[in-house]
Image (cartoon, coloured by chain):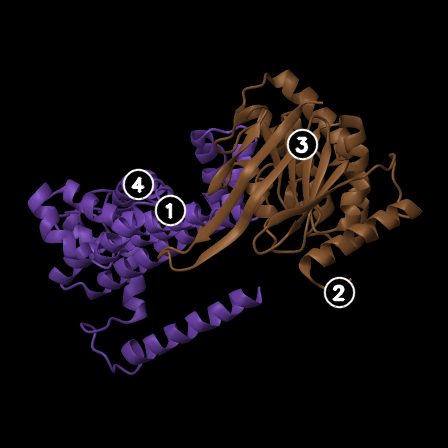
Chain colours: A brown, B purple
Amino acid sequence: MEDVLVAEHVSKVFESADSFTRFQALQDICLTVAENEFVSIVGPSGCGKSTFLSIVGGFETPSSGRVLLGHRPIYGPSKDRGFVFQSDALFHWLTVEQNVAYGLRVQGYPCTQQREIVEQCLRLVGLTAFRAATPGQLSGGMRQRVAIARALATDPKILLLDEPFGALDVLTRKKMQDELARIWVQNQKTVVLVTHAIDEAVLLSDRIFLMTRSPGRIAECVTVGLRRPRSVRDAQFRELELAINDMLMNELGEEP
Amino acid sequence: MLRMAKACIAIAVVLAIWWLTTGGLHIFTPLILPSPVTVAQAAWHLLFDPQLTLFSGGIYNGNLLGHALISTGRVALGFAAGVLVAVPLGVLIARSEAAEPYVDPLLQILRPIPPIAWTPLAILWFGIGLRAIVFLIFLGAFWPMLLNTISGIREVPRILGQAAASLGASRRQVLFTVVLPAAIPFLFTGLRLAFGSAWITIVAAELIAASEGLGYLIMNARRILAAPDIIVGMLTIGLLGLAFDRVFRIIERRLYAR
């Protein structure tokens, strides 16, 4: 399996305007993601995982190190790296359909092809009935489904998800996690998911990177060997979840 | 409905006080403050006197409708010019983070200068005539539109541009397909405020050399000692300004509902 994404010694330092305060957000992050692999980065709030994903997305530049996509270093955002934000990133003046079609529109896809792809994506996330609604009329979970459909429509090489369900209530979050698992099985895209929910990571990923904070480092990489479809009630699932939890607690120096 | 009733009550009270102090108790002489009756008569005359055609006739040089149309036309010109210059400039300034510390102080200094203070300069540059008048109105519209455009563009969340970029949009596409559409409600508020500001400027602008228009009507009325006409002119300006504002607000509400 080819490595689609490679992060080489990525570090990020935030300096205040007067260079007086220096905050090291990320230190020497190295990781790889293979094609069709679903990878998660898990860590406590503030550990820098979102910062790292922003760098991979091209919205921030690393202070040192670099990120390669398919052997080529990345410069800024591009259609190769689809991004799903935590919330409020839909174009509120466009309908669901128009949002999903946006990437295809700006990239110049012919109209018939646009319609086809939009149909497929809406069906995939189960929102065909809401194609003419505007984001304001949808619930949080539905909006995130639109965001996912929109990102998938342009068929990016890799899909980046930054705590996509963090803004949702617990029940919706669980539902969306199952949705994403189902979508991914049909799609098998290369995915990097950032989340603080360990169960989410275990449910969805092939491998999980554990990240600790101040500064953010990759502490561990855990392979999830469980067969899909996975169930939260499964004993092995629970075991793995607890083990990861303990590992994170240890790294943070807190009592498990 | 209740709001309308309250507004009517307020207007009725003011009218009553007005009448009492002038026609009723004669506290003010007709030259200082004419009674509402004479003002109503003057309004009727200015609107419907057959001797006054739309743009000419008698010492008024036209009837009320004619003057209102001319003033509106001038404001429309100045307003359009102000908006056409302010919006692209505002977009440029708002998008350039580097420009901000240079440009903002300059704007803060120039903005408080009221258009009427530009009158001598306007006459020097454009002579006495339509161009100078439109220039003052242009200034009236320009500043609110510029500042609202800048803040409107800056209000657009960065995340929208980032999302668009990750979907393959170029910088230019992000501007035209995301930033501007997202900023439309703010821009429209700017349009409304700019028009209001341009409208207020009409009297000052027509001081320069107009021989028609609502501003001219008011000034001319003083010269011929027709005090009621002054009030008619003022009320017409006020009511038209209100009407335009309402129209803008209706459209604005539709836009904000997106």
Question: Which one is closest to the eye, mark 2 or mark 1?
Answer: 2
For the residues bearing labels 4 and 1, Cβ distance under 8 angstroms: yes
Q: Position of residue B55 (x, y in %)?
A: 22, 42
For the residues bearing labels 3 and 1, Cβ distance under 8 angstroms: no
Identify the amino acid type marked 4.
Leu
Quadrant occupied by the N terminus of chain A:
top right
Question: Which one is closest to the eye, mark 3 or mark 2?
Answer: 2
What residue do we see at 18% from left, 56% from top?
B116
For the residues bearing labels 4 and 2, Cβ distance under 8 angstroms: no
Q: Please give the residue where the numbered disc 3 appears in the rendered image.
A: A33
Dots 4 and 2 on the same chain: no
* Image mark for residue B89: 4
Q: Position of residue A247 (x, y in %)?
A: 75, 53
Q: Please give the residue where the numbered disc 2 appears in the rendered image.
A: A255
Q: Please give the residue where the numbered disc 1 appears in the rendered image.
A: B149
Question: Which one is closest to the eye, mark 4 or mark 3?
Answer: 3
Dots 3 and 1 on the same chain: no
Mark 3: give few (<14), some (14-19) or many (20+) Cα within 10 Å. many
Q: Position of residue A128 (x, y in %)?
A: 75, 32
Dots 3 and 2 on the same chain: yes
Q: Is residue B116 visible?
A: yes
Marks 4 and 2, how far apart in space?
Answer: 58 Å
